[in-house]
Image: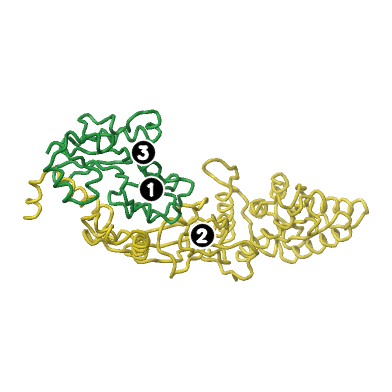
Chain colours: A green, B yellow
Amino acid sequence: MTRNVFLVMNRCLGCEECVEACRRENSISLCYVDSYKGVPVPFRCANCETALCEQVCPTEAIHRENGIVLIDSEKCIGCRSCEFICPWGVPIYRTDIRKMMKCDMCVDRQRNDKVPACVEACPTNALVFGELSDFAEDYHEKTAARITKAGKLANEIILPQEG
Amino acid sequence: MTAASQKATSKTKNTKKGFEPRIVALCCNWCSYAGADLAGTSRKKMPPNMRVIRVNCTGRIDPMFILQALERGADGVLISGCHEGDCHYVEGNIHSKKRFDFFKKILDQMGMGNRIDFVHVSAAEGDKWAEITINFVKKIKKLGPSPISDVTSPTALDIDQNHSRKDRIQELLLSIAKRLGYEQKIPLEFDPDEVAEGYGFPKRDPEKCIGCYACYSVCPENAITIEDVKNKRRYGTLHAHCLVCKECEKECPQEAIKISPGFELLSFLYNTPIWEFEVAVQKCSVCNEFFNPIPFCDDLKNRITDKVAKDKLDEMNLPYNPYTTCPDCKREKMAQLFAEVAQPAMKGGSKSK
């Protein structure tokens, strides 16, 4: 099981601290907070198990490293296929370098045993970083059932916790 | 160069009767300049209309030099280099000749093409140099004075951050066209088959191109332009910027691009792309906005179903059609999905709506 950023939905305030942290870290914000009828929904790369972006990339620039989906900027030709297929719209087309860029779970920070910048910045711990089994003690059955109903993508990123 | 052409302009123009042309000759150091020297030392009789300027190699001669001389009132420009294969710098004269042939077509269009010439004179050919000089001066005398009568306020030529070399050449061309009263023909009428080898532009196969951004992204000179107009996505090329590096041909994921002969280099279309190809754009099934070319969506579909089994895609249970929904609507749908997980009460609300 790989470490990933998980989301505890009802803790999020929609303050966009994670977006700001991402901008400080990467000089461009690679995640964002949407809201649906007043409910804030923070999005970042989910490192989907069957990554659609990995499938569509014509040059195989998108690959997996320890479970993290990364873009090899040398191979990237900027065709924007991944941008259009990603369910979250996570890969961003950078007009200055004409290449795609996406959330890499702060691999550089992870090497120095730090958590990703957005997780560190989150004031309410709505974003948590770790393996799914790390959070098993707070398992909430009803939420889990709802998430499973919502589909596989939700299953991979929302944590069944606290109703 | 500058000094000579300025000297040429400082004198008042002669009338047609007894017209003495002022001609700038650009000679390569290793062959033609020595040849001209030999013609001098062997006391050949030559007309005194040539102002010879020594350059290290004809490969050094920029179209800018020729334009600059013409703009400042030179009646003719003669370029002289080594014979092919004799170049001191291996192939400088071949490059220069190629560039010259190409460049001359633009001046031909403007009616100045017969005032410039490219010749090959070796260091031993003093006689030939004298002959060429006599003939060229005769030719220019027959043509009469340069049609550019107004030589005041020449174009600035310094190259800095705001003005590239190409910008300056374009400015010079426009300035000369203005002084000549030449009406710009867009595009210039060339026979593409005549084009010197190595020139071309990216041409798309309309059946293969799917409308992605790969060629646009890999182009090192930003020569490829993509524009979305209503339900079409247009592809164009800035011919003056294309280096014919073939990067787009190499990188196109569909192998749709081929470098085809044809050019508009240095023409008046400097910053105006020539639109070449159009592709229909898909309408978003949710918000009815145009967002992505239809063949692009089809291609994404093929690429996914090739690799992933269909039931695996169904398992993901995406709340939208992945190929006909625009990114904004996708995000909204995903947000809705997530919000409903957090606040199950909202589900009823959205249903009743």
Chain containing the residue with disc 3: A
Q: CA distance from mark 3 to mark 1?
A: 11 Å
As drawn, the label of residue B269 is 2
Q: Quick check: A11 above or below B142?
A: above
Q: Is residue B22 visible?
A: no
Instruction: From the top left corner, tell me how far across and down residue B100 is, in percent.
Output: 68, 59
Quadrant location of residue B80? bottom right
- Most foreground residue, B268 or A119: A119
A10 relative position to A6: left or right:
left
Do the residues at discs 2 and 1 belong to one chain?
A: no
Kind of residue sitting beneath label 3: Ile
A146 relative position to B85: left or right:
left
Query: What residue sits 59% from the left and 42% below the top?
Result: B158
Q: Answer yes or no: do the residues labelled 2 and 1 have beta carbons within 8 Å?
A: no
Q: CA distance from mark 2 to mark 1?
A: 29 Å
Q: Is residue A46 visible?
A: yes
Q: Which residue is labeled 3 in the image?
A: A28
Do the residues at discs 3 and 1 belong to one chain?
A: yes
Kind of residue sitting beneath label 1: Tyr
Query: What residue sits 7% from the left and 51% below the top?
Result: B348
Q: Secondary structure at mark 3?
A: loop
Chain containing the residue with disc 2: B
Quadrant of the rendering where the C terminus of chain B is positioned? bottom left
As drawn, the label of residue B254 is none
Classify mark 1: residues with Cα within 10 Å, few (<14), some (14-19) or many (20+): some
A131 relative position to B76: left or right:
left
Q: Which residue is labeled 1 in the image?
A: A93
Q: How many marks?
A: 3
Q: Secondary structure at mark 1?
A: strand
Q: CA distance from mark 3 to mark 2?
A: 35 Å
Query: What residue sits 52% from the left and 66% below the top?
Result: B187
B349 relative position to B65: left or right:
left
